[in-house]
Image (tube, coloured by chain):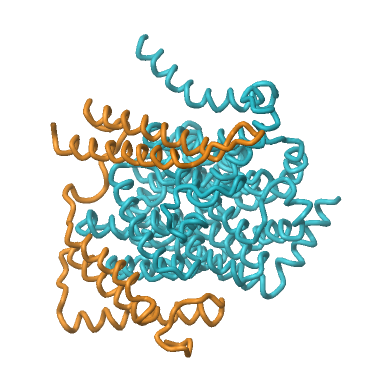
Chain colours: A cyan, B orange
Amino acid sequence: MDILDALMQGFATAISPVNLLWAFVGCVLGTAVGVLPGIGPAVAVAMLLPITAKVEVTSSMIFFAGIYYGAMYGGSTTSILLNTPGETATMVTAMEGNRMAKSGRAGAALATAAIGSFVAGTIATVIVTLFAPVVAEFAVKLGPPEYFMLMVLAFTTVSAVLGKSTLRGMAALMVGLAVGCVGLDQISGQPRYTLGKPELLDGIEIVLVAVGLFAVAEVLYAAVYEGRTAEARNPLSKVYMTPRDWRRSIPAWLRGTAIGAPFGCIPAGGTEIPTFLSYAMEKKLAKGDNLAEFGNQGAIEGVAGPEAANNASVTAALIPLLTLGIPTSNTTAIMLGAFQNYGIQPGPQLFTNSAALVWALIASLYVGNVMLLILNLPMVKLWVQLLKIPKPQLYAGILIFATVGAYGMRQSTFDLLLLWGIGVFGLLMRRYDFPTAPVVVGMILGPLAEAQLRNAVSIGEGSFMVFLQRPMSLALLVVAVAIVVLPRLVRAWKRRK
Amino acid sequence: MTNTQKMQSAVGAGVLLIGLALAAGALSIPAAAGYGGVGPNFLPWVVAVSLIACGVLIVREALTGGFRAMDPPSGAERAYWPAFAWVSAALLANAALITTLGFILSCTLCYMLAVQGLRRAGGQAAGRPVGLAIDAATGAAIAAPVYWTFTKFLGINLPGLTQSGWL
């Protein structure tokens, strides 16, 4: 029972008072940013990246994981109580959750979301515990060509599959890759795109891009376009589930977990597909009165299933992050950046080189789930108060935090100017519906992918054929091409029929 | 050509220009591939060429009926530019003044300017002395604890007006 031993070691570290405190603060902060519109886990982690300079690595990763997790719980509160869907992950929850809240059942919706998140999060953590070491062991055998193709796969899904338009997704990815190129080339030491500015030799900080694209752009967007948008808030009812609610929720949670977890495990990312699948499945399985509630008073399965699927896939996404070093969402990409700030490169060696860190992090997920359940069920009324903060003050306050993140990293006013520039860029991206995740993933994964590409081609003695000669990299290449080409072929074929 | 189409074409042209600029920059990166076969200028060229292609295709989409697979953007149809000016002024003033005024005062000013813009965007009254005083107090009430938390507890360097670490 190596795994159990390791996990127990992890618990020993994770429940030390200091780490418990970090986990708790992370969960509180995460829930808060999840509840607050206009700010999400990615930007919260990004703003706090400067702490990696001072705080010990285990504590800060536990802290970031708490934020990552907490935001998932908090996000569902907002999507049920406000009529504006927040991030895509909770859009599905909002469909039925909103209807339930309108017909006076907000409490039941919040309860099924929180308990479902707990159930799914815990099951998925067990999956991470059991499978991450296995995947790591397997991943040791992968060479640069396979790694490069895995990254290409991640790029393709993040840019082409998850967004609405492949073209705009690709453009966003390329911008991210270009940003990743700025600075000294890691292999040859050549400066690239530095425009002669010494500030740019180190490259552009992740914090700047994330905070600029998510926080500053969001504030600008709210000011320029959404000043007059009125928000309707649904009344909160008693947080309570009837026996019938339980009977309907439990199978939906389990089915949601079963759909969500595998999606998180593959280095493709996105919670949209599993949550929509879970929603469709629940609707299909519902009968009689339950079915009639879908789209009318709101069906509790329609909240329970997708919410569980969301949390399961978000948790399982830690497997590709920790074992392959491949992030598949904004937040995991920024967490990868946090690891890099400590000089740690997540990947198969992480489980041997930094075993203590990894297991403490995994153990903290169990602890965090329990904390979040307590924070979100009995105390949901407190969080709802956050929704009362008026928009001008909220968004202006976000700018103060943005300054801390952007300036705290390098103490450079040049970065603050750049932050504004990136914010304006993000405003345009938001208005013209360019996805932002490809920019962040491209920027962080780009330099890693480039290094793997160059290693792979040297293994192939300068020939790109190396990607076709190795079965595994060829298979990955075929998959990556297929997920772009197949949907188009099917559409074209349907049109002809 | 409708206004939306004009704007969308401009966005596509912007992508195209970024691609061209990156290509121009890639020209000055040496190819020195060593025995690897792929040099430091390989990825920049891939990115530049792809962005040029994306730019051309986006312009084409814009001219032939607008962006595909696009939901109408949220919020108002027309931009409210004065708010943009206020929020931009907030950020730029912060960049200009943070080292001289210190974090707390500079961020309070940034907060006040941004709130002005956001209030006006929402059609609220702004600029009354009482309101300004309340905004200044709120901004300072956010900025000061943030400053203390980050400098005192987390040991992050943020500029102060004095050397005391409290202001």
**Closer-to-camera residue (B128/A200):** A200
Would residue A241 be visible to someone looking at this image? no
On screen, residue B159 above or below A329:
below
Q: Whole-percent x and y of residue A150?
A: 61, 35
Instruction: Describe residue A148's horizontal placement relative to residue A16 as left or right.
Output: left
On screen, residue A156 above or below A197:
above
Q: Whole-percent x and y of residue A349?
A: 75, 48
Q: Pick out the residue farthest to the top.
A: A497
Q: Whole-percent x and y of residue A433?
A: 32, 42
| Residue at figure coordinates x 32%, y 65% from the top left | A395
Q: Whole-percent x and y of residue A106?
A: 40, 56
| Residue at figure coordinates x 53%, y 23% from the top left | A482
Q: Where is residue A138, by image quadrant?
A: top right
Instruction: Describe residue B37's horizontal placement relative to residue A410 as left or right.
Output: right
**Closer-to-camera residue (A439/A87):** A439
**Closer-to-camera residue (B94/A325):** B94
**Closer-to-camera residue (A12/A431):** A431
Would residue A140 be visible to someone looking at this image? yes
- Callout count: 0
| Residue at figure coordinates x 53%, y 64% from the top left | A49
| Residue at figure coordinates x 49%, y 63% from the top left | A31
Instruction: Describe residue A315's horizontal placement relative to residue A201 as left or right.
Output: right
Instruction: Describe residue A305's horizontal placement relative to residue A105 as left or right.
Output: right
Looking at the figure, which quarter contains the C terminus of chain A?
top left
